[in-house]
Structure formats: structure tokens, C-alpha cells
Amino acid sequence: MHRYLVAYFSASGVTAKVAKTLAEAANAALFEIKPKIPYTDVDLNWMDQKSRSSIEMKDQASRPELADMNAPVAEADVIFVGFPIWWYVAPHIINTFLESYDFTGKTIVLFATSGGSDFGRTLEALEDSVHGSGRIMEGKMLNGQQNKEELAAWVESLGL
């Protein structure tokens, strides 16, 4: 039996809700990826072009520092990493998370939430952040209501 971990970043609570249901469905440990300096409501105002530019510059200028470095990655064989899609890529806090741990011999399965985007270039943008000989794969967009049974079937269908 594989040991699973669901690690997620959620700015508004949408991804958190999906991650919690996925963790229950996969009988997985759950870890919230949090930036040391949280994004503000102003940063996250997607309707304000000035705010969007501000957060893009903050997020791209450097990797946001993690608030907690205690993710139980070493105990897991498969790590589901979830996040909202921001402008067709993952927030850079996900790069920070992936760069902070050794994923040798592990499989990373991405999942995301979005109001309308797909994965875009997300997988390509994250591949270089995985340290060790870990395998990273695009998983699934998990928008809308997700039930435990559907998520358990998805996890099973991965054949990991």
C-alpha cells in the first residue's frame, strides 16, 4: 500500500476544500503550504489590473518563503500537490515547496482549481523545481463540487 500525502496551497479556501476531500478519499496525510508572508486581500483582487501586476511581480521576483518546513514528504510515496491556477501557471509558492524537499523515488501528482483556466504551462514550469529523481505528472483540474467517491476512483485510476 502506498502512503499518500496531499499538500496544497489555497488563497481563498477553494483549493483547501478540494484538498481535504482528496485526503479523505485517498486516506492521505494533509499539509497546507503557506507563505511566510501571506498574500493580502489587495494582492488577491483579480479584478484590479494594478493588483494583478503587483502580485505577479512579487511572485515572480523571487520564490516566496515557506511558513512551515515540516511537510511529511519523507513518509509518502505519492504526493498530491494542489493549488489554484494563476494566469495559467501555479503560484510560485509551489516552486518553493518543490525546491525545499527531496522527492527521490516519489511520484508527484498535480491537481488544481481555477475559475476557467486549464493547466496551461504548469507542468513545464514546475518540472525543474523537483529535486531528486522524483517523477512529476499532471493530474486533474478539480473544479466544482468534488465528492469522496469520485476522488477515490480518480486516485485508483492513476495506478500508482
Image: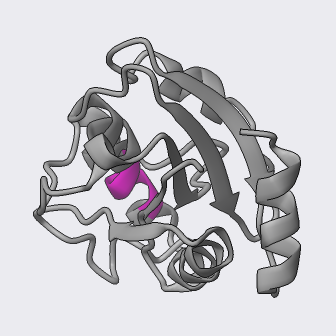
Q: Is residue 115 above or below residue 149?
A: above
Judge left or right: residue 29 versus residue 113.
left
Can residue 30 be seen here? The reply is: yes
Most extreme residue toward the front is 1
- Give the image quarter of residue 66: bottom left
Tell me: residue 122, above or below residue 37. above
Instruction: Please state the horizontal and vertical placement of residue 31, each as a whole percent of the image.
Output: 34, 67
Q: Main SS type for the magenta part?
A: helix
Write down the region rendered in magenta: 52-56
Looking at the picture, does residue 158 appear above or below residue 99? below
Quadrant assignment for the C terminus? top right
The residue at 78%/52% (across/down) is: 140
Magenta highlight on residue 55: yes
Q: Is residue 28 magenta?
A: no
Residue under the image location 41 percent in, 52 percent down: 53
Q: Is residue 24 above or below residue 155?
A: below
The number of callouts visible is 0
127 horizontally vs 112: left or right: left
Is 131 in front, or is 118?
131
Residue at the location (27% across, 29% down)? 99
In this picture, residue 114 sits left or right of residue 153: left
Residue 47 seen in the figure: no
Residue 128 image point, x, y percent = 43, 15
Q: Quadrant of residue 88?
A: top right
Pick the residue in front: 114 or 19. 19
Q: How far across and down, in percent of the image, does residue 105 sit? A: 44, 21
Q: Position of residue 106 (x, y in %)?
A: 47, 30
Q: How is the image coloured?
A: one colour
Write the residue at 75% across / 71% down. 115
